[in-house]
Image (tube, grey):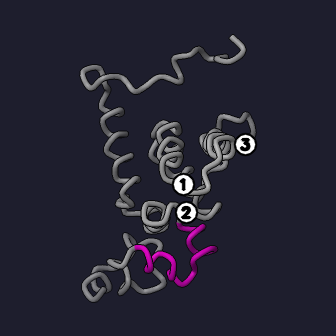
Amino acid sequence: SVFFPKGPGIYSDPPPPSVRSPRDVEGERLLSLWKQGQTGVPLVDACMRELKATGFMSNRGRQNVASFLALDCRVDWRRGADWFEHLLIDYDVCSNWGNWVAAAGWTGGRLNRFNIPKQTKTYDPNGEFIKLWCPELKRVPEKYVGTPWLMPEDVQEIS
């Protein structure tokens, strides 16, 4: 069919719990953490918390969180697109779903996996945005705000 070149099944709901694989169960857990802004990846968490609180997220943030969910967590991109559809105040069906298709690598072009720590250094070098939305990181030194898992133990104790 022209409308479903890979079959209508790719647009169906996830399988019921009784037939889900461990990967499906893990995907649900990761999706939940992503929605709450509790992934442990500061830039992703800050962007998701901003979205939940305000209904807005910058285009760069949208690209980062979409790449993270679809490519790093390997969660079905449609789940992220659906979440954005419910929360974005500037929601546009074509932009949203088109951008999620691209983020998941389904456009046939190059796969654009975002390096989140590098994106953090480029777009939030002092950690101001992260610290605004993730106050639990306010005492983390700038050097580690985007990658707190790299902090030495002695720095963790005072942060």
Range shown magenta:
117-133
Return the residue at label 1. Answer: 88
Left or right relative to 115: residue 41: left
Tell whether position 126 is magenta. yes
Residue at 50% x, 41% y is 82
- Examine the rendering and report whether any part of residue 124 can be seen: yes
Decide which of 147, 54 is in the foreground and name it.
Answer: 54
Decide which of 32, 139 is in the foreground and name it.
Answer: 32
- Examine the rendering and report whether any part of residue 63 can be seen: no
* Mark 3 neighbour class, 10 Å CA radius: few under 14, some 14 to 19, many 20 or more: few
Q: Amino acid at mark 1?
A: Leu
- Label 1: element kind: loop
Task: Give the distance between the C-alpha atoms of the residues marked 1 and 3, in whole angstroms.
Answer: 27 Å
- Label 2: element kind: loop
User: For the image shown, how many numbered marks are present on the structure?
Assistant: 3
Return the residue at label 3. Answer: 110
* Prevailing secondary structure of the magenta residues: helix
Return the residue at label 2. Answer: 56
Task: Give the distance between the C-alpha atoms of the residues marked 1 and 2, in whole angstroms.
Answer: 6 Å
Marks 1 and 2 close (CB-CB < 8 Å)? yes
Location of residue 59 with respect to 135 vertically, above or below: above
* Mark 1 neighbour class, 10 Å CA radius: few under 14, some 14 to 19, many 20 or more: some
Residue at 47% x, 75% y is 130
Decide which of 36, 117 is in the foreground and name it.
Answer: 36
Marks 1 and 3 close (CB-CB < 8 Å)? no
